[in-house]
Image (cartoon, coloured by chain):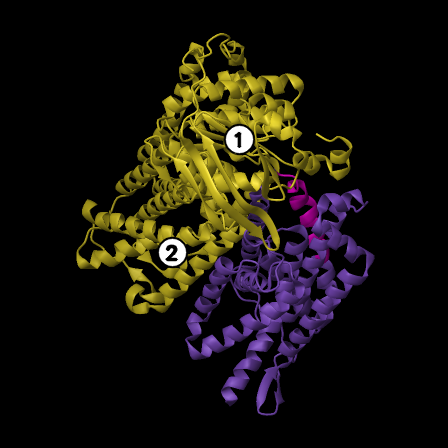
Chain colours: A purple, B yellow
Amino acid sequence: MDTFVQLVLNGLMLGGLFAIISVGLTLIFGIIRLVNFAHGELLMVGMYLTWIGTTQLGVHPYVLAPAVVLVLFVVGLLIQRFILQPLLEARDAHVQIFATVGLSTALINLALLVFGADLYATPSSGVRDSIAIGPYRILVGQLVMFVCGIAVVAALHLFMERSYLGRAIRATAQHRAAAQLMGVDVKRIYMVTFGIGAACVGLAAVLVAPIYPASPTVGTYFVLTAFVVVVLGGMGSLHGAFIGALIIGLVDSLSGFYIAPDLKEVVIFGLFIGILLLRPTGLFGLGRGSE
Amino acid sequence: MSDVTIPATARAAPRRIDAGVIAVIALLALILLVPLLVGDDFVFHVFITICLYGALATAWNIVGGFAGQLSLGHAIFYGIGAYTAALLVPLGISPWIGMVAGAAVSALVGVGIGLPCFRLRGPFFALATIAFLQVIRLLALHFTGFTGGAVGLMVPLQTGWQWMIFFERWPSLLIAFGLLGLTLAVAAYIRHSRFGYYLVATREREPAAAAAGVNTLRVRLAAVAVSAALTSTVGTFHGMYLTFIEPEAMFSLAFSVQIAMFALIGGIGTVLGPLFGTLLVVPLTELARGWLGASALGLHGFVYGSVLVLIVLFLPDGLAGLFRRRTATDTSDVEASAPAATVPAEAKPARPPLGEPILVAEHLNHRFGGLAVTTDVSLSLRRGEVLGIIGPNGAGKTTLFNQLSGFLAPQSGVVRVRLAEGGLVTPTTPHGFAHAGVGRTFQIVQPFAAMTVLENIMIGAFHRHPGRAEAREKALETAARMGLWPQREVEARSLTIGGLKRLEIARVMAMEPRILLLDEVMAGLNQTDVRRAIRLIEQIRDEGVSVVAIEHVMQAIMALSDRVIVLNSGRVIAEGQPQEVVRDPTVIEAYLGKDFAHAHPA
């Protein structure tokens, strides 16, 4: 029983990590209707930035959060403006996929060129210490991620519901042409949305870096799970992504222990294929999975 | 129809193609001869790599380009090819047999993956293929007894043609070149056959393809089977060439993406595009790697990714787009060869008498949630008859058509079609209805936008003329008849709405249907075009085709219909001679409201 509770705790904590990586992905899909295959590489960029910041400046990784978030926001803005925006009216819907796939490959290999294939561990600065809750233990960093995951989802939700910009973003998502007629600058909305999505993954990078070392392919590793999370929760649904992340975290933790550590991903991807085929709208989706 | 004359210039295949064929042969000869003449190990390596990637990208393009299904999991088949052969070699079985066995397994796996996944679109299909790739890679790592797991497999070093492993480089080049030639030949054959046209049509507009008699799932599955088998053969050879295989390298996502990228850079959907893409980036990166050595780790991927982004931004049709644009302008001057005679003036055959019922619907019912869109609708169409269907917007006319053509299965009730041989059948799919002789148009026109007008019509013509030449002949004849002759080489997307409506009819007429369902083909046409369309439908009718026409243009309904059925709120509210029906108070009420009906008693 103790093992099981500990596994569930681990799963939930892992879910917090997946949640914070997935939120930006689902936001970009929900609003821009774009599956960002380069999402993981934005995480990778953020993790390298955190590593550079901590080793060069000697500060606690969390201190870098505002700076990394800002940089990623700008990077996201630029990607949308200069790579994706020109493709908005493309006659073949596939070209946006090609663009993000190309960007992903270019970024992975740029990292390989600059940093090589070595792992770069950001100093953990106490983030990897564990705290005891009764007989169970969790890492400080995991708890922070879990709390931040909830906070980001809640903050984004409030922003979308309450602020003027949030309403404009939702209006654009529901009907691009109509929003445009109502005076919404759609291109700006898309830039801001992609920027926010990238900023979320920037925050994720700062929190993940002290726990997992940075490498060129670290993004691929996390983003594949993030896709599963987002599809499970329903592409575009923020709270769906959060709940999806917790489910996948639990599946990961439990199947790793009860089935086999090296088969837990088989379970996760099997689940993914099942959802895609049987319920492409996910748990809380917008009903667009099969389109 | 035989009285339509086609200018001879249109029949003969354009001479230019010959020059293109020579250029391609010269290019392939260079790929083979340069390394043989130079004889340097590095040059051999570069050209073998070109052949391998060229073949892989060409094979990928059959699914990713022709069928438009963006697979990012093609390494599955590459890995299966390599593993099948490598596992058979220790049993004393030649990799040539392993190659065939691997291809067969890959084709089966491809169909197994495609069957459930082809309903997914765009990014979701791509994600599903990635997921399958991950599952297979992880399983290959897990079952170490079978695959050797992460340690990998060494292929026993037996040399000679029988074992596909050589001391010299040139036999490997020869095999790689042969595989490139094979995939190119298969791709070229597919692209220029009915199968290829069907694939592109399915990619462009699945419903319209289905209405033209294409079994859309089956052509896609056939495409994935061929593509997987070809990819697998390359995998077998590459495994033997490397003499060492491991799951991380064989079932790699990055590798899958790379294959797709070469095709995308070169121009998907074209036969030679993937080879062009390979020829552009492989030498570039291999040379850079040669110069920079180990410090160039990641350079090739960086170049591939960046080139892809640039191509997508500035050359959306890929490198092949450069060539196509030029040839497209070239043909425009041939346009001058005047249009053939359109509709013959005085060749009217006597209208045959009406025959037995040929299309029968009995007690059709359909509800969308709480909304009854079809309630107990029965109708029968007699051979040679023109049946008009009218009714206000939202009456359920198009829904009825969808049930009469297999696009929507009625929740209860049955639709029967009389075959040419006389028996009644109940098809269940759109292509099933097409094979039973039912052709339909769509109210919202559904052109295959990226195809030319002629190719659009050919999709219909293939239904009864499987050969490309005969289908082309039939399509030319139909184009002339429908007044689309001047636009025949134009891409369908650039037609006006009137032109698109005519194309819609031309495509269905090229199918030579016995029963024709026309969904508001006159909406939005001007007076001249309406009169022209009426004459056309009369002519079609006089050739013995039975017609059901949904129409709002009363002039057309009155002129053409032998009988009219009026639908309102999913029910048949009136049926009879056109003149009677339009005087029926319930009909007037349905169209114009109660007040009007009372003010003008019939």
Q: Which mark is residue B461?
A: none
- Specify the subunit that label 1 lies on: B
Looking at the image, which residue sits at the far top? B346
**Residue B225 coordinates in the image, percent (x, y):** 35, 46
Q: Residue at x 22, y 49 (%)?
A: B97
Q: Residue at x 55, y 43 (%)?
A: B308
Magenta residues, dominant SS class: helix
B115 shown above or below B211 = below
Which quadrant holds the N terminus of chain B? top left
Q: Which mark is residue B250?
A: 2
Image-quadrant location for residue B501:
top right
**Residue B154 coordinates in the image, percent (x, y):** 28, 60
Mark 1 or 2, closer to the camera: 1
Image-quadrant location for residue B518:
top right
Instruction: Give the magenta range.
Output: A73-90
**Residue B459 coordinates in the image, percent (x, y):** 45, 30
For the residues beneath circles 1 and 2, the answer to whether they share a chain is yes
Question: Are dots 1 and 2 in contact, CB under 8 Å?
Answer: no
Q: Is residue B16 visible?
A: yes
Q: Residue at x 66, y 18 (%)?
A: B527
Taking the image as shown, residue B26 lies to the left or right of residue A76, namely left
A84 magenta-colored? yes
Disc 2 marks which amino acid? Met
Taking the image as shown, residue A113 lies to the left or right of residue A238, namely left
B132 magenta-colored? no
Q: Is residue B330 visible?
A: no
Q: Which SS class for mark 1?
A: helix
A125 shown above or below B140 = below
B512 shown above or below B369 = above
Looking at the image, which residue sits at the far bottom? A134
Q: Judge the density around disc 1: few (<14), some (14-19), many (≥20) Cα neighbours within 10 Å.
A: some
What residue sits right under mark 1 in the picture? B321
